[in-house]
Image (cartoon, rainbow, N blue to C red):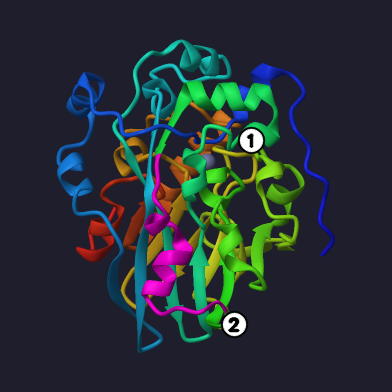
Amino acid sequence: MQRQKFTRPEASVPLMIEMPINHFSKIHSSKEGFAQLEIEPKGIQKKMSRASTQSTTVQCNGKSIKIHAIQTGTVAVKRSHRSHPTAHFLTPIKISLDKHFTEFMPIWSWLIEHPEGNIVIDTGENAKVMNPDYFKPAGKVIANYSKKNFRFNITKENEIGFQLRHLNIKNDSIKNVVLTHLHIDHTDGIKDFKNVEFIVNEQEFKRPSGHIPELVPNWFKPKTVQYKNDFITVFNQAYPLTNREDLLLIPTKGHTNNHASVLFKTDDFDILFAGDVCYHQEQLVNKKLAGINADYKESRKTYEKISKYAKQRQLILLPSHDSNSAIRLKERQFL
Ligand SMILES: [Zn+2]
């Protein structure tokens, strides 16, 4: 499939609306962090200290399948970026004016040791983002916005390539790397997967929000896929990632215009690798939108669909920046 030319929003405000979570900065210990904790779901900070690569085993078609939660470092965003009581299209301006950062949140990637071949979901961040010049190739506007609004804490050992080597997973054993969307904290690990087939839904690839093409290796040419209709209850559309159709790419729009999630249908329950549908599960449960969305209306619809689906089938929800995601999977905590 031919690579589409990436486009960037022209004006600075739309760009801000669609900017991904990103940027460099050292760990920020502070009153801000503690103040933030009070409004966070209980136990988040405690569990953060335990967060690292964690594994669990599920049953699928009678076989044991291992899933690894791989934490590729942490990110902090403005508090109003993560949540805002009146989230709408002007919220990004308020985010810029917000002086307070959240605590550092994990950046999860996932590895499923599927019998048809290993599947990686999102590639996380890389250590070079700590370099103040990292965003320079993307131009001043993006670089300045990023510097002001995002903080990262990433080491070389946090990178997905390093962690997969530690797990003895070689690239030739990987069937696909699936990307939920094209924000840098999901794509900055692409560099570690040369010669592996990437999968991105076609619409997200054609019309990315907040993507920074200058930071993606020039050999990156994903297979772009189209959803099939009438494939699954509630979500309707899906693209099967495996022949057994136990692993599905499904549309979960809103955070970006064509954000996708990966649904794993195990023998006992379903798992939704939810990318940036929400920052943490409580947001979805309490129907509170994140401060920043490419399409607020679609984000709300996605919340409704996930909640509806969870009523039909036991579902474990795994957002990419939820401190409790790995533990929730391990302890089988359902939505
Ligand atoms: Zn994102």
Q: Which residue is mark 2?
A: 243
Where residue 278 sits in the image (x, y, percent)? 42, 40
> Is residue 291 something one can see in this rendering?
no
Q: Quadrant of residue 195?
A: bottom right
In this picture, is 303 found above or below 316? above
Q: Nearer the viewer, residue 101 or 156?
A: 156
Where residue 85 sits in the image (x, y, percent)? 38, 18
Can you tell which mark lies on residue 183?
Answer: none
Give the mark nearest the N terminus, 2 or 1: 1
Where residue 255 sits in the image (x, y, percent)? 54, 38
- Identify the residue at image location x=68%, y=48%: 204
- Identify the residue at image location x=36%, y=72%: 67
Estimate how packed mark 1 is, as few (under 14), some (14 to 19) or many (20 or more) residues with alpha carbons within 10 Å: many
In this picture, is 62 found above or below 56? below
Q: Is mark 1 within 8 Å of ligand 1?
A: yes
Q: Is mark 2 within 8 Å of ligand 1?
A: no
Q: Nearer the viewer, residue 173 or 231?
A: 173
In this picture, is 227 found above or below 181? below
Magenta range: 153-171
Secondary structure under badge 1? loop
Secondary structure under badge 2? loop
Can you tell which mark lies on residue 210?
Answer: 1
Q: In the image, is 142 to the left or to the right of 165?
A: right
Q: Quadrant of residue 74?
A: top left
| Mark count | 2
Amino acid type at image mark 2 = Asn
> Is residue 236 something one can see in this rendering?
yes
Q: Nearer the viewer, residue 202 or 214?
A: 214
- Identify the residue at image location x=34%, y=36%: 283
Specify the quadrant that holds the N terminus. bottom right
Q: Is residue 174 magenta?
A: no
